[in-house]
Amino acid sequence: MSSKVILNSPEILDESLVNLTEACQCFPGRCSRPAVERWIRHGSRGIVLESVLVCGKRYTSREAIDRFIRGQLQAKPSTTHLEPQKTCQKNLSMPDEKCQSELSEIVLIEQGK
């Protein structure tokens, strides 16, 4: 019986394979398994985390993680800007009495009064 292997990067089989839970620990800072799965499926900033599917289990490699991180550092930041929600704009344009009082104090302090 042969095992099924699906590659999105053939050289990954010659590298240090880790399962996706172990992969989370290879990233600096906090990283979740769903994030790793998302980077494998969809990528981030145009960079996809390389992986291999062996007998129904997904693996990546320490080297692939290193390439992914380096790619993220070299990728251009996203130019997409989200517009604030209208409700937030409405709330900011009409602060409540307490906020208005604090804002008045700040203005007076900045003006040196």
Image: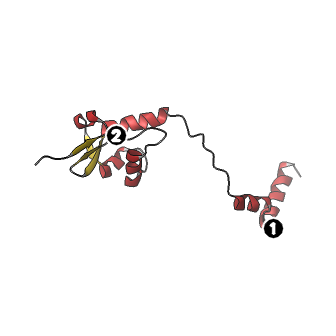
Mark 2 / mark 1, whichever is N-terminal: 2
Which residue lies at the image location 25% right of the left edge and 51% below the top edge?
Answer: 57
Question: Could you tell me the amino acid type at mark 1?
Answer: Glu
Q: Position of residue 96 (x, y in %)?
A: 78, 66
Q: Is residue 104 left or right of residue 36?
A: right
Q: Is residue 67 left or right of residue 59?
A: right
Q: Is residue 83 or residue 98 the one in the foreground?
A: 83
Tag 1 residue: 97
Which image quarter: residue 52? top left
Question: Could you tell me the amino acid type at mark 2?
Answer: Glu
As measured in the structure, the alpha-carbon distance from the residue carrying label 2 to the one carrying label 1 is 54 Å
Residue 93 vertical placement versus 80 (above, below): below
Q: Position of residue 37 (x, y in %)?
A: 37, 50
Q: Position of residue 17 (x, y in %)?
A: 25, 42
The residue carrying pointer 1 sits among few (fewer than 14), some (14 to 19) or many (20 or more) residues within 10 Å by Cα, namely few
Give the foreground label among 2 and 1: 2
Which residue lies at the image location 55% right of the left edge and 38% below the top edge?
Answer: 77
Which image quarter: residue 88? bottom right
Q: Is residue 29 or residue 21 the one in the foreground?
A: 21
Tag 2 residue: 50
